[in-house]
Amino acid sequence: MTDGKDDPAAVPGGRAYRTPRERAALGRAARRTTPRSRHAEWAPSPLRADPVDVIEEQSARRVPELVPIRYGRMSESPFRFYRGAAAVMAADLAGTPVTGLRAQLCGDAHMLNFRLLASPERRLMFDINDFDETLPGPWEWDVKRLAASLVIAGRAAGFSAGERTATVLAAVGGYRAYMRRFARMGDLDVWYAHFEADRLQERFAPLLGARDRARWERSQERARSHDTLQAFEKLTHVVDGRRRIAADPPLLTPLRDLPEALDAGVERELARLMERYGHTLQSDRRTLLEQYRVADIARKVVGVGSVGTRCWIVLLLGKDDEDPLFLQAKEADESVLARHVGACLQRTQGERVVAGQRLMQATSDIFLGWERVHGIDGRRRDFYVRQLRDWKGIVVAETMSPEVMGVFGRVCGATLARAHARSGDRIAIAAYLGGGDVFDRALAEFAERYADQNERDHQALLDAARTGRVTTRSA
């Protein structure tokens, strides 16, 4: 079995030319070395690391006072644990069968990292959102992380085993069907492919009941309202005639309330970050950024898996004090995939995140860029920068019916196929998958088995909290 590292046809950006027929033959040949049914396999290695050790290794590099919040959130349910345990699953996936075909991976392709987003043309799109772990690697890993997340969410929602299987089959079937569709398309057509919310509604509305169609329409409206102006009203207030970020510790702490950060010159470093990061933008977007001025900065706690990483939000003001722009500067550490697929080729981890996002997303934030600065502890840290809110809408898995989760899973699978088709050999992958559902059913089995493992790992964290090995805190 090969991981594809030495095959120029399997490495994004290093592909030697092959005819479509040769590429399809490559994919079919992979069935002999890695039968599709083998993807059902999952059993923990006898040498498998303690999942709590893996999580604690990450936490050692994070803001110490925020780490208990991370553990508190991951303790709440197996699904929340899964969202924060990308490093655990990356190590597990490294021991599973692969075809040797590679693509740019999201690295954390669970179902809640697919959501509604705004395009620069102000169109509402459906796409992948989180790229903290992005790296080139085996395409199967992203699909398996998505499949397992659907089973874990389905268990939380009380779905039967049959309903969970149907959901995974819909998602993986969507991936396979769209990868085969992209295999027939030209390179530019694949690059321009995207999923607009309005088109998705037309395509999938007939599969939903009236109540679910109404929920979908409301979710679009909510996504459009989650913009900079909404964040401006929610997160700021006027103090002595100046617009300031309102404190909500520990989740949102203005820089002025972090004396150790002020003493270490973090304000100066972050101001320089805002100035220098602009050079990673296109020239027209840099010109737009230069019209804004920094008004305030705060530390923000984000997500589940990201809790404890250094994340700053920056309030900028344009033509007047009612013309805001909120940017988020988020720390970028080494990808959890790196020790299993190799280090990134970019000079900094922030650039790695941005490069992966630009490659996988159909259209990216106009302010997406990166920079490196010195932290409070004197260490150089990598950051990537993007808008804090730009028409973002996220699903609530707990309220989904099996039918809705099946439709949602299919859209996620199609979206992931489009993202992989940009960098991976879509013709070879499509030929490997074939027209039948052998791979789909294998992943349905894998997902159930891995959901069992995730529940055991979640229990291990609960046990560690009960014995005092880790400290949890709600926030």
Image: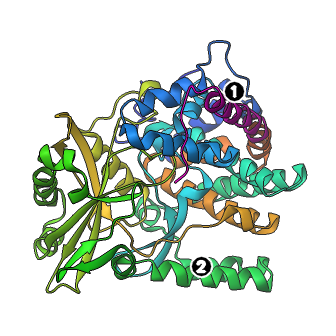
> Is residue 184 in view?
no
Q: Is residue 441 left or right of residue 54?
A: right
| Labelled pair 2, 1 in contact (Cβ < 8 Å) | no
Residue visible at 80% across and 67% down in the picture? 401
> Is residue 452 in view?
yes
Foreground of the two, 462 or 157? 462
The vertical placement of 362 against 440, above or below, is below
The vertical placement of 394 against 102, above or below, is below
Place residue 214 in its image quadrant: bottom right
Residue type at numbered disc 1: Arg
User: Mark 2 highlights which residue?
Assistant: 219
On the image, the x and y values in percent for residue 77 come to 69, 47
Foreground of the two, 395 or 102? 395
Q: Range of the magenta residues? A: 447-475
Place residue 344 in its image quadrant: top left
The N terminus sits in image quarter: top right
On the image, the x and y values in percent for residue 163 come to 86, 56
Q: Is residue 360 left or right of residue 271?
A: right
Foreground of the two, 442 or 396? 396
The vertical placement of 366 against 57, above or below, is below
Q: Is residue 144 left or right of residue 287?
A: right
On the image, the x and y values in percent for residue 407 come to 72, 67
User: Mark 1 highlights which residue?
Assistant: 32
Q: Is residue 462 magenta?
A: yes
The vertical placement of 225 against 57, above or below, is below
Q: Is residue 299 magenta?
A: no
Residue visible at 55% across and 50% down in the picture? 474
- Local secondary structure at mark 1: helix
- Local secondary structure at mark 2: helix
